[in-house]
Image (spheres, rainbow, N blue to C red):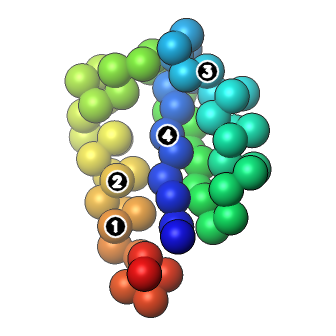
Amino acid sequence: MPTLLVAGEHDRNAPPAVMKKMAGEIAHSTFPEMKGVGHLMNLEAPEAFDDIVLNFLALPSVLLH
């Protein structure tokens, strides 16, 4: 199942290194790191966060099932 893992560059709760390692263990995962933000990515950079999520959801449906 395609999986999206997003981390903020300055996230102390779910650090990018941990999220990247997790993504490496999940087949078909996508891992973008958001520069300049912390744990509350959707509040700190809502437009960039929404773009990441919407682009992931726009993948061909065959990849999401």
The residue tagged 2 is 53
Q: Rounded to the nearest whole Å, what is the CA distance between mark 4 and mark 1?
A: 14 Å
Expressed as whole percent of the image width and height from the top left, the position of residue 55 reads 37, 63
Disc 2 to disc 1, C-alpha distance: 6 Å
Report the number of numbered marks. Answer: 4
Around disc 4, counting alpha carbons within 10 Å, would you say few (fewer than 14), some (14 to 19), or many (20 or more)? many
* Residue at (67, 56) in percent of width and height: 26
Q: Residues within 10 Å of mark 1 (few under 14, many from 20)?
A: some
Q: Are marks 2 and 4 in contact (CB under 8 Å)?
A: yes
Q: Nearer the viewer, residue 42 or 13?
A: 13
Mark 1 and mark 2 in contact (Cβ < 8 Å)? Answer: yes
The image quadrant where one finds the C terminus is bottom left
Q: Is residue 18 left or right of residue 4?
A: right
> Neighbour class for label 3 at 10 Å: few (<14), some, many (≥20)?
some
Q: Amino acid at mark 4?
A: Val
Label 4: state its secondary structure.
loop
Name the residue carrying label 4.
6
- Residue corresponding to mark 3: 15
Q: Specify the quadrant of the image occupied by residue 18.
A: top right
Precedes in sequence: disc 1 or disc 3: 3
Please, what secondary structure does the residue beneath circle 3 have? loop
Question: What separation in Å lies between label 3 and label 2 (alpha carbons)?
Answer: 19 Å
> Residue 25 location in percent, x, y?
74, 51
For the point 51% across and 58% down, the residue is 3
The reply, left or right, for residue 18 in relation to residue 13 is right
Determine the secondary structure under disc 2: helix
Numbered label attached to residue 57: 1
Describe residue 7's horizontal placement relative to residue 51 as left or right: right
Tag 2: residue type?
Val
Left-right relation of 4 to 53: right
Task: Give x and y (percent) for residue 62.
Answer: 44, 89
Q: Residue at x 49, y 81 (%)?
A: 63
